[in-house]
Amino acid sequence: MKDDRYAALLKRVEKPGRYTGGELNSEWKDPSEVDLRLCFCFPDNYEIGMSNLGMKILIGCFNRMDGVFCERCYAPWPDMEEQLRQSGTPLYALESGDPLTDFAAVLFTLQYELCYTNVLNMLDMAGIPLYASERGEAYPLIVAGGPCAYNPEPLADFVDVFSIGEGEEALPELAELIRTCRKEGVPKAELLYRVSQLDGFYVPSLYDVTYHGDGTLASFSPNREGVPATVRKRIIENMDEVYFPEKSPMPYLEVVHDRVVMEVNRGCIRGCRFCQAGMVYRPYRDKSPETLNTCARASVGHTGYSEISLTSLSISDYPRLPELIEQLLTWTEGQKVSLSLPSQRIDAFYEELMAKVMSVRKSGLTFAPEAGTQRLRDVINKNITEEEILTACGKAFDGGRNSLKLYFMNGLPTETDEDVAGIASLAQRIVDLFYSQKRTGRSVNVTVSVSCFVPKPFTPFQWEGQTPAEELERRQKLLRDCIRSRKIDYKYHDAQVSFLEAVFARGNRKLGRALAEAVRRGQRFDAWDEFFDFDRWMQIFQDLGMDPAFYANRAMGEDELLPWDFIDIGVSKRFLLAERHRALAEQTTPDCRTKCSGCGASALCKAPCSCDRKE
């Protein structure tokens, strides 16, 4: 911030550094010297938003444009919200301190369904009407994108424009169109129509929805000639040429990921049937080790961070990972900069790589078996065996590790009590493996972290109903009773939280009423345990005559029109249905590197494939 307009408010909050701006490396342009002002909002607190690489990338893409200035805003914590509301101060952007109503467009990234109430609450704090239909020419254009935008319908009544897919090229195109229309004095309705003509943008007001008597969708169609019936996602073809923010703002506070984060690739070759990211981010594309090394070195130089995190949906599938680590180690070891990897596929883990990464600092190792029995791993297409799991854990123990974290899920389609107990059995076998060889003076710790399965759009399991919360809680207790070793720590996710996540993951436009009412009744920060109120949510649904189980727990028909069917992610619905049938038959599908399965996204796929051709 460039003045002391808010000094009195900041003296009354716990962490004023969340709201001041002016961090080292933060961008500044004189607002009077630009012709398009944008504000990018993160609907969670500063510490989480400042850790988000996607937001940094997209803000940088805007600020590279001449005459465009993109500022930032994060969801105020309740103590700051109280100060803003009591003083009648509208929500403002960090860089200039100007209210959000001063901007041509306000953009939100949708990373998690339980942040939807924060989106609406931020609009309300800014003095911007929640409903798009109530916002006239004087108000900013409200834009949203991110992973949750692949089912935009629960927020369709509130958002003017959704960006579908990757935004590095698409959003600057949108900014240029907004700037042109403002110069020409084009009304908002015509601007929205022109936006709909750009690839990768969805304008909800230009589509009409009807329903059957049972609440399922009857039709979804454009209401103006020339508006496309299908919105195709945008993708970046050349990852080496995509913008990367080497000079990111340095947070005043300790944030969730206080390190350099390097995106190694996009897409995944695997095809786990529960994983939305593995489908919507197809096709597989990666960056070269040379590009990654150059960006990492520049980022460390600009920020002084002492850790680099390599991020990917499946880091072990990056074919040039050993080469990348070799290049990084030529300078990170000397500068005492450590390297960290995300959870790895067990079948691709090997000892030499682990030893190299550990050369600077030892840290815990994370694997994701996802299911405790081979039958269920085949259902979800995990394509790993118990022998591979134990071999990888043995290599980790031989390499000096004595702490492992294992990710699993409860409630996967076709799961039985035997599958649940299998998680405990597998964890115990890993503990026994550690003690099968003499490791003097050392003890092992295996953490079993179990989330609840949430059916997501654009996955083979999108048609499956979520297991009811009461049954998930029973299975959680069963697993706890099956774990008998003190060497195994058991952590699990709240089934009620997962239920609400499923409601909004598979919801339609009717849920907008519930979101607006929830905000009116004080719901916000639903992703935080201290603010999540399941009973209040259930009362809201009851008062509005809505059945949340219709969205979360109901198995959808294969011929049913789904709320997100108008979006084309490249992966065909035919492929997703075929994968669902293979799952129910307990049949696996090979990864893209072994054999192309004809998912529909292969035209731009960079995954090496042994096939003679890609279908």
Image (cartoon, rainbow, N blue to C red):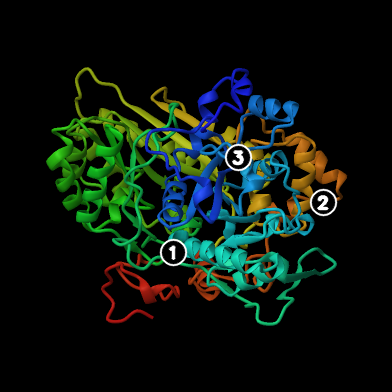
Q: 568 left or right of 12?
A: left
| Mark pair 2, 3: CA separation | 39 Å
Q: Nearer the viewer, mark 3 or mark 1?
A: 3
Judging by the rendered image, the residue that carries numbered circle 3 is 98
Residue type at mark 3 is Asp
Judging by the rendered image, the residue that carries numbered circle 2 is 546
Q: Mark 1 vs mark 2: which is more N-terminal?
A: 1
Q: Nearer the viewer, mark 1 or mark 2?
A: 1
Residue at 37% from the left image edge and 38% from the top image edge: 25
Where residue 257 appears, as percent x and y from the top left, is: 40, 35
For residue 243, above or below residue 470: below
Q: Nearer the viewer, mark 2 or mark 3?
A: 3
In front of the other: 543 or 419: 543
Residue type at mark 1 is Glu
> Cβ–Cβ below 8 Å for labels 3 and 1?
no
Judging by the rendered image, the residue that carries numbered circle 1 is 169
Where residue 387 appears, as percent x and y from the top left, is: 30, 48
Q: 112 left or right of 127?
A: left
Residue type at mark 2 is Met
Task: Using the rendered view, name the quadrant where residue 426 is placed.
Answer: top left
Q: Mark 3 vs mark 1: which is more N-terminal?
A: 3
In front of the other: 443 or 348: 348
Residue 584, visible in the rendered structure = no
Q: Secondary structure at mark 1?
A: helix
| Mark pair 3, 1: CA separation | 27 Å
Q: 35 left or right of 90?
A: left
Task: Using the rendered view, name the quadrant where residue 340 is placed.
Answer: top left
Circle 2 packing at 10 Å, graded few (<14), some (14-19), many (20+), is some
Where residue 526 appears, as percent x and y from the top left, is: 65, 37
For residue 561, above or below residue 376: below
